[in-house]
Amino acid sequence: MSRIFNFSAGPSMMPESVLERAAKEMLNYADSGMSVMEMSHRSKVYDKIIKDAEKKLREVMAIPDNYKVLFLQGGATMQFSMIPLNLMTKNKKADYIVSGSFSGKAYKEAKKYGDVHLAGTSKEDNFSHIPTQEELTLREDADYLHICENNTIFGTTYNYLPETNGVPIVSDMSSCILSKPVDVAKYGMIYAGAQKNMGPAGLTVVIVREDLVGEPQEMTPVMLRYDEMVNNDSMYNTPPTYAIYMLGLMLDWVESMGGLKGMEAHNEKKAGILYDYLDQSSFYKTNVVKENRSLMNVTFTTGDEEMDAKFIKASVEKKFSNLKGHRSVGGMRASIYNAMPIEGVEALVAFMKEFEAQNA
């Protein structure tokens, strides 16, 4: 069976060239006589893999020297606990903007560990926009402000970074990291699950300003302490070795695409094709306000649940995968992360036009 266009929100598709390289190196990596999957994480061969992955990430994202890079496990969801346990320690206060499902979960979890303030939310309009600066109520003595930069389920993204008067911004970039250039120095911390733009599931990347690592709350389990992970170079225990290796391959591919500026142009072109069609269609609708439209996750509906179900069934028959919207919101969702080729979006729009003509 030939490969299909996979619009999964995650784990998502990866570039064929990356998968082919991984397959070629599967049985015998760098003449080591073994697979990366079999390697001791303490070996010299693997030491080079993990150090090269960090070096490449620092280069691609232009990460300043005063930021630590950690390769962890537990997904972005584990960070919902790690962040307050490690960073909500000075004044035991934190502000959260809830702009979707995952930021809501992060907010709920953080409330277990200190004084957590809802600084803004767009829940009242079903998360169709990102709260503006004017809609926020921020505290000057908060230890940090938490945001989810791109909302996978609702298809929204920030078009600005909140002004916090020096309060560090902690950003969940799980579904938009590596999709465009980012000024890391404007953040206190960035974290992301790898399974959207960085490789397979199992790896979580944390980029944290070193002065924020500090002293975690006393009750913090050792595996949830940033300082322990920093002091042990992400190897307090066995890290997700193969996923880190795959991150290195993905970063090589990003560089081959022109780095993050090249990725941004690639992603803007793809999303533009799909949004331009949605804007002129009277059959499909997207509820996201234009200024907050995600380049990674495009949500839409016909406005009729039965028609949406018919669309999903027809899309599967046409060899498109995972276009069904999240169970909490319904409709359709096309996740067009970095690895989705322009041809995939063009094929999707052609199918949408055909379906519209047959069912409008």
Image: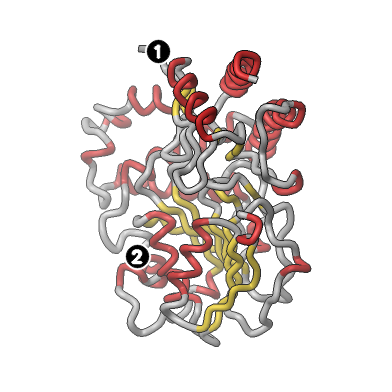
Question: Which residue corresponds to mark 2?
Answer: 232
Residue drawn at (53%, 47%) of the image: 153
Residue 307 in the image: above or below residue 1: below
Q: Quadrant of the N terminus?
A: top left
Residue 187 in the image: x percent, y percent?
63, 64
Q: Which mark is residue 2?
A: 1
Q: Nearer the viewer, mark 1 or mark 2?
A: 1
Point out residue 176 in the picture as x, y percentages from the top left corner. Answer: 58, 46
Residue 143, located in which quarter of the rendered image?
Answer: bottom right
For the point 40% across and 82% down, the residue is 217
Q: Which mark is residue 112?
A: none
Locate residue 73 relative to residue 208 in the image: left or right.
left
Count the numbered circles shown: 2
Quarter holding the C terminus is top right
Asked whether, in this view, residue 46 is left or right of residue 152, the answer is left
Q: Is residue 11 visible?
A: yes
Dot 1 crowding, Cα within 10 Å, few <14, some 14–19, many 20+? few
Name the kind of residue labelled 2 in the image. Answer: Asn
Q: CA distance from mark 1 to mark 2?
A: 43 Å
Q: Is residue 27 left or right of residue 19?
A: left
Amino acid on which the number 1 mark rests in the picture: Ser
| Secondary element type, mark 2 | loop
Q: Position of residue 55 (x, y in %)?
A: 50, 48
Secondary structure found at label 1: loop
Residue 65 figure quarter: bottom right
